[in-house]
Image (tube, rainbow, N blue to C red):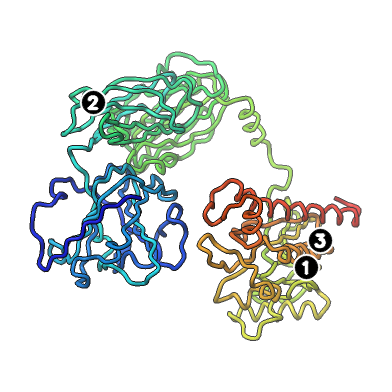
Amino acid sequence: MQKIIQILILVTFFVSTSYAETMRELPISAIGFIGPGAKMDPPESAVASASAMGSKASIAFPVSNRSLVIDLGEERLVHQVNLYDDRRDNSGTSPLISKYGLELYTSHDGQHFVRYEQPFEITIEAGRQPGVFEEVRIGGLAIMARYIKLHAELPSKAYDFCNNNLQQMARVYQDPGLAATLVELQVDRYVEDRAAFSARIEMPGEDGSALWLEVLDSSGKKLARFAVPKDGAVRDQFDVSALKVGPQVLQWVLQSEKWGVLARKSRKIFKVNKIQTNPKLRVEAKAGQVVMLDQFEGTWGEADFVSGQGGIRKIRQGDAGDEPLQVTLPVKGWYAVSIGLIDESQAEVQLGSDAAKKVKLQVWRQYDKALGLGEALVGVANLNSNKLTIRPIGKAGCQIAFVRLLALSPQQIQLTKAARVPNQTGRVTINNDGFSMFYSGTNSKEQLFKMVDKYRGKRLYSYDYCLGSDATCTYDTKVGTVFGSHVEKFWRQGDRRAYEGIKKLIAEGNDPLRVVIDRCRSIGQPVHVSFRMNANYAPPNAKTMNGRQYWDNYDCRIVNSNKKYSYRLSYAYPQVREYRLAVIKEGLTYGPDGLNLDFLRHPPFVGFDQPLVDAFKEKYGLDAFKNPNDPRWLAMQVEVMTGFVSSVRQVLDEESKRQGRK
């Protein structure tokens, strides 16, 4: 990357008109950091932790491959980034940055970063602000992003400068003469074949005739392009008939012939088959069709609502104690019914003769808290001009924006009907971790009976009992480690109780796994053994919870993308797979009805492990660490687990033949 580095070493504060003073400072949501470390994830994928973002700790930079991450809160056009040092050390010289320079990376989501390849200039000066001893200006930029990452690959633990409050380390600027602002963008939330919008653009330093506004779909395909007039106001509509029915995210991108992308905003819409706003027109149900009602008769008052997505709409509002609003639903057929509520609105709603239910704003708030408009599902019903009764409740009363009716497909209707048939089969699984009751003091066969008997006569799909894995087993295992049998000093008193209880039961001839399975059989309850796929544990409970086989295979731990070891073993090693398959085989000899592979405990299952890295290098000639997102590398990792599950299936089939049942 081409860099121009200018170093100005001054003894006193340098006072002059700065380039930044001609610029507009942009707000920063938070500043975070990654590292430092001798080896780190590639800058393209390394992500600052949530705890690092917003930290006000004293931070050094650019020590040992550390990265700084600036979150602007939303996508913005950036022309300059300033870094500030409030520690008197290098007299305004920044020797490391002068020698190595900096790399810039940008991101829209904070997860995937792209290196900024355009030339830029780094200027280093003694600080001019009170309390600032050093200032590094990174100028000549044209970045459109939400996140900016500054990075330098340095082997040294030495650092250039330090700021006693990370949030004061950086400022971001924009040249008003080159920057536009989409100060207003209004789009209808529900659209049929064409979408109408209005936008107002503020562009103080640019001729409006040289600008245009593009609308893109979620894949980046251009839907429309509009010239921006000199007054900056654009009002138009465009074709959305090719979009799939359902939620869509569209982007409005402001561009200049001279400067490229200047501003960007996104809006969520909902593409529907049909919009019907007249409550007096009867509509026959067609799958996927949406009927929108926003005209209501009744005594509720009208009010204006300013949407967080732009635009003003009329709403109806009622206070607690007001007469209920009666809405005739002008449709015939199966529909899902929801109502649009504002802010803290709550209502009691009744659909036809169904029982009344309470609803409140809950569905859409997570997509944009500033929107203030959400939907609440009333129910699903076979309608025929039914009435919807809405009664305001609570201190805030109820503000309603619309009633939305979605026509169901034949498959959805079938599922709805099936869900209303009373349950005659077991749909619930009880998952027993095979340990907690021993931790609490269980140590007799009778207590295990009582544990199982509480589900006698219940319609359960299965009672799942955990075997354990490298985290040791709580039955009389011959291939694994009986819990606690390898431990001299226990982590917790409960762990010692568990060991003593399990040891007592086994000594009495009451193998806990045998007792549980036989008891389930006696009460007619299907029982499965459950195997935790990667239940390894980190300190402080590592020595207690991880059995001998774990420590025998300690070199088979997962390697992360930063080339550091995890504490979990990797399925990439044949000896790990063989041991875990042996535990599963042993559990099946107890005669359960099935096996639960518990992948929840605990991913990941493979990493950048030597057998896989070597195989990838041999097959494709590539370094996996430098190609972490290569589909072929991901496929190679997946094949390990697919192969293991296939081995488990083979073992189950063999056991089925031996026992004479599936």
Q: Position of residue 75 (x, y in %)?
A: 32, 42
Between 497 and 386, the one lying in front of the other is 497
Image location (x, y in percent) of residue 29: 29, 52
Q: Which residue is mark 1?
A: 513
Looking at the image, which residue is at 72% across and 72% down? Answer: 474
Q: Residues within 10 Å of mark 3 (few under 14, many from 20)?
A: many
Name the spot of residue 217 as percent of width and height, x first: 43, 30
Sequence-first disc among 3 and 1: 1
Please provide percent x and percent y for residue 637: 64, 53
> What residue would you read off at disc 2?
210
Q: Foreground mark, 2 or 3?
A: 2
Instruction: Please say whether residue 398 is visible from this viewpoint.
Output: no
- Determine the image quadrant of residue 544: bottom right
Contact? badges 3 and 1 (CB < 8 Å): no
Closer to the chain start, of discs 2 and 3, is 2
Q: As rendered, which of 578 and 138 lies closer to the eye?
A: 138
Q: Residue drawn 34% across and 44% down? A: 145
Q: Nearer the viewer, mark 1 or mark 2?
A: 2
In the picture, measured across the screen, residue 624 lies left or right of residue 230, that is right
Instruction: Report crowding for label 2: few under 14, some 14 to 19, many 20 or more residues within 10 A (C-alpha).
Output: some
* Residue 212 picture quarter: top left
Check the image and report above or below for 228 versus 610.
above
- Earlier sequence position, callout 1 versus callout 2: 2
Q: Can you identify the residue that label 3 sits on?
A: 588
Distance from disc 1 to disc 2, alpha carbons, whole Å, reads 77 Å
As shown in the figure, which amino acid type bears the numbered disc 3?
A: Leu
Give the left or right position of residue 622, taking residue 445 as reference: left
C-alpha span from label 2 to label 3: 73 Å
**Residue at image coords 36%, 47%:** 116
**Residue in the foreground of this view, choosing between 239 and 246:** 239
